[in-house]
Image (cartoon, rainbow, N blue to C red):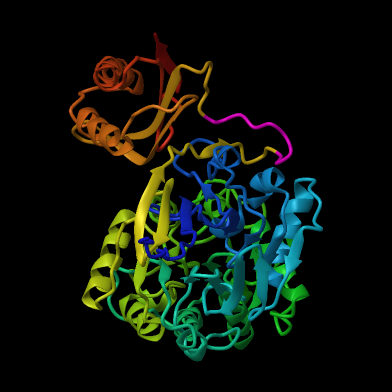
Amino acid sequence: MFRPRAQIRPRTYPPLLFHPLGGCGEIGMNLSLYGYDGDWIAVDCGMMIRQDLPDQPLQIPDVEHLAAHAMGPSAVFITHGHEDHLGALAWIWPRWNCPVYATPLAIELLRAKFIEQGLRTDALKPVQPGTCVTSGAFEVTFLPVTHSIPESCALSLVTPRHRVLHTGDWKLDERPLIGAPLSASQFETLAPVDLVVADSTNADVEGHSRSETEAASALEAVIQNCRGRVVVSCFASNIARIKALGGIAERSGRRVALLGRSMERMVSIALQLGYLDDFPPRVPTHDLGYLYPEEVLIIATGSQGEPRSALSRMAQGRHPALDLQPQDDVIFSARAIPGNERQIERLKAGFKRLGVNVHDEHTDPALHASGHPAREELRQLYRWLKPKLLLPVHGEASHQEAHRELAADLGIHVPHLVRNGTVLALEAETLVVRTQHHLRPQLIGSRARAGEPTQPVSARKHSHSLSIALNVLPTETGWTRIGRLLWDSEIALPLDEDSLADWLDERIDTIPAETLLQLRQQLFGPLRDWLRERLPALPEIHLQLMPADPQPEYEVRSVHSR
């Protein structure tokens, strides 16, 4: 009797899932989830400060759908201590209640946030660079890299079937002021990796990023030629820059003062961890007025034009401890975050009205060193890693596209320019889209507490409403929209944000309104008609127009209609 031969089917393995909830197509609010065989981990959990909205609310990622789809992470891994990589965790962690692994500096920053929000801190687990942590099916190794904050790490993620490198933020700096240069061997030993999830922030910049040592030299050259007070504005997290300024102050016969709560907090933590052991004694703010101008060097926050910052108050002549005088000098030693350009220009104009000398990347490009890799650094990393696939993240769409073009020149396949909310599956050496979740990042008041229920900045009165808010600025010919469009709804709507933004930009540019109220009245009807054509049912529409440069005569109200 004939017996069929037994068929041996090849064993199938679960795919690796990748689900970004922030940081793709935008700068900031980085949060990525990785899943394998039912186990999920989160990498970073950042926030974004919405300077384009009144009161500068915090924007945090949308994680509402994770529990319903069994995607809640069993651990969180933080690559470094910048706000756009850890600033949302105090708000989101109570939903997950899982261990958080990060290097000591990031842990201390998180500890301060957790204590401030009334959260327990026993879930915060400090690890040293080089440490390997196992969480479910994942082996996660912290690989030290150079960046604009100490203890930054890329993450090697290993499952039973996959090898992935999540770069975080990094650069190649052969002469860092704090820490050792990046080690090529740690990446060469990983090759070949199945997938690199890579920082795209400077993927459109040819060449090599500047060293922190070069930035320090440029700062010293400018400061040595200053005759009045010197105010240097940089990111509070750039401890290497702050350390360099302390040495410059001593060599130029100046005394150091710090302005800004975040600056004081960061310096305190850096001193605690030994990064600023040789930093000179600081002058109390209230004593600045008693010192000769040529003896003062102030390190201040506010380089992004934040209205309530110490720098903004000085530009308006409203700082309680210090009035800048003509021939004082203000140095901007920080990159403009995309979207903040207009606020920064208004800030610089304020200083110029006071007769203060302004130094920035236009007067001397070397005053700042980026913490992100330019194109030659990306090429070098990929020569070490020999990746099979690459996903550009951590950047706007133009940065992701530039990154894809660079990878193509190197023969590296980029299957997708991933968007926030997409679920990708790595299987059979390719990436396929599983699904797309509609995300609605949450806006919370900057003074709210993480343990309390939060109300969105845009009012939502019932589940069938659509709230739209935008900042506008009058021009010589009409109006223009400034910053990012905000729209929100209690229910998922088949609404394309890019199409809506394009329509609004084109429409308001043609409206000959003299006041904000007239603009609102002339915009609302066409907006309602545009939405009626594209939505299955017209919701209640709340339209809020806000002046980008508020004036007393602008009364901001919400218009709504059924």
How far from the left and from the top, in percent, is residue 523?
28, 20
The answer to which of 479 and 438 lies nearer the viewer is 438
The answer to which of 333 and 86 lies nearer the viewer is 86
Q: Is residue 283 visible?
A: no
Outermost residue on the top side: it is 562
Outermost residue on the front side: it is 1
Asked if 114 appears above or below 271 in the picture, the reply is above
> Total of numbered circles in the picture?
0
* 329 within the magenta span: no
- Which quarter of the picture shows residue 136? bottom right
Majority secondary structure of magenta residues: loop
How far from the left and from the top, in percent, is residue 238?
57, 71
Q: Residue at x 64, y 32 (%)?
A: 454
Asked if 495 appears above or below 259 in the picture, the reply is above
Asked if 101 appears above or below 171 in the picture, the reply is above
How far from the left and from the top, in percent, is residue 170?
48, 74
User: Where is the C terminus found, in terms of image quarters?
Assistant: top left
Q: Residue at x 40, y 75 (%)?
A: 373
The answer to which of 414 and 459 lies nearer the viewer is 414
* Magenta region: 449-457
Give left or right: position of 240 versus 172: right
* 451 within the magenta span: yes
How far from the left and from the top, in percent, is residue 479?
26, 32
Q: Is residue 191 visible?
A: yes
Give left or right: position of 71 versus 549: right
User: Where is the N terminus found, in terms of image quarters?
Assistant: bottom left
Q: Residue at x 75, y 52 (%)?
A: 114
- Which quarter of the picture shows residue 153? bottom right
